Image (spheres, helix red, strand yellow):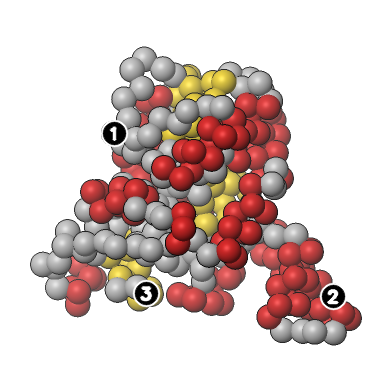
Amino acid sequence: MILSVSLAADAGRDPEQVGSVSCDICECRTRSRFRKNGFRILECRRCGYAFAHPRIAARDVAALYQNLDPAARSPDQHARYAKYVGDEEEPRRVYRALGRLGISFGRVLDVGAGLGKYTAFFQAKKFEVLPLEVDPFCIRRIQERTGLIAAAEPFEDWNPRSARYDVILMSQVLEHCRDPRLWLRKAHSLLRPNGILFVGVPNFDSLLVAILGARDGHICPPSHLNYFSRKCLSILAQQEGLRIERCFDWSYVTFTFCCDIMATRLFRLTAARWLGGTALYAFFRAADAVHRGRYLYAFLRRDENGV
Ligand SMILES: [Zn+2]
């Protein structure tokens, strides 16, 4: 991904004064956790919410997703995308969780629909789906795949008129937006009573982040501007009239994937590859079990007694 971002927004702020920057969720003091790509990742000392500093302007965030040149994506990236698109396991898990929460039909808004994985799955399950996507390459792919024309506006600027939704999907998008509070507030206003907002985000409290630190692939400002743990996501949701009905960790890896990683990175012998893959897979399963997995999958119910 080629990123060209003007970082003029907070350029006047002395980078050594980052300790004075307060948390956007609980207003507590922050500490500098990582440095990467010219940014610091500041983490709240109380709720654990982390964010890229200095903040970048909204227009620069929008520019990140308008300037993507498909020709600049490497063949490897194309192959990974194709594999990703073909994988229905993630939307299937979300669909099943929604069913257990009492939603098996209705209107779905897919915010940041990407290549249309969720849109296609929920369309096949007879939901009425509206994808929202700003990347022109993704918009073309969604139309090819589902026949649906995505609304091509940033979520914060989109005017839905009177529409209300049973489900709003935000899969791997909340970490990209400039103001997650604004997004949750808008989602609350767009949900029907007792509707569900699904949020899938990288887990900043994961074992992988604890081990790899800034080398973890999800620590990637300015693409990822926000970093969530279960705790801070719950606090932010509650502040905006949403309550977490269900939240689970899933590291999004398969046994075959773990063996492939070992094959390409470390081992050439089949037995060593299998043993290494088994150990890596067990690591991720254990991380999920103790709520330190790579991703959080949270289902937030519009709380009629709240905001
Ligand atoms: Zn905080």
Q: Earlier in the sequence, mark 3 or mark 1?
A: 3
What residue is pinned by disc 2? 274
Asked whether the residues under the numbered discs 2 and 1 touch, taking CB atoms below 8 Å apart as contact, a structural biologist would say: no
Nearer the observer, 240 or 196:
196
Query: Which image quadrant: the C terminus?
Result: top left
Total numbered labels:
3
**Where residue 99 appears, x then y in whole percent?**
68, 28
Which residue is most to the right? 271
Asked if residue 170 shows in the view, the reply is: no
Query: Which image quadrant: the N terminus?
Result: bottom left
Residue at position x 34%, y 48% from top?
A: 66
Q: Which mark is residue 199?
A: none
Element on which disc 1 rests: loop
What residue is pinned by disc 3? 36
Specify whether 286 is left or right of 192. right
Element on which disc 2 rests: helix
Does residue 190 lie above or below 270 as drawn? above
Q: CA distance from mark 2 to mark 3?
A: 34 Å
**Where residue 87 appears, x then y in whole percent?**
69, 47
Element on which disc 3 rests: strand
Asked if residue 180 shows in the view, the reply is: yes
Q: CA distance from mark 2 to mark 1?
A: 49 Å
Which residue is most to the left? 12
Nearer the observer, 64 or 252:
64
**Where residue 193 appears, x then y in whole percent?**
48, 19
Given the image, on which type of amino acid does mark 1 rest?
Asp
> Does mark 2 have its CB less than 8 Å from ligand 1?
no
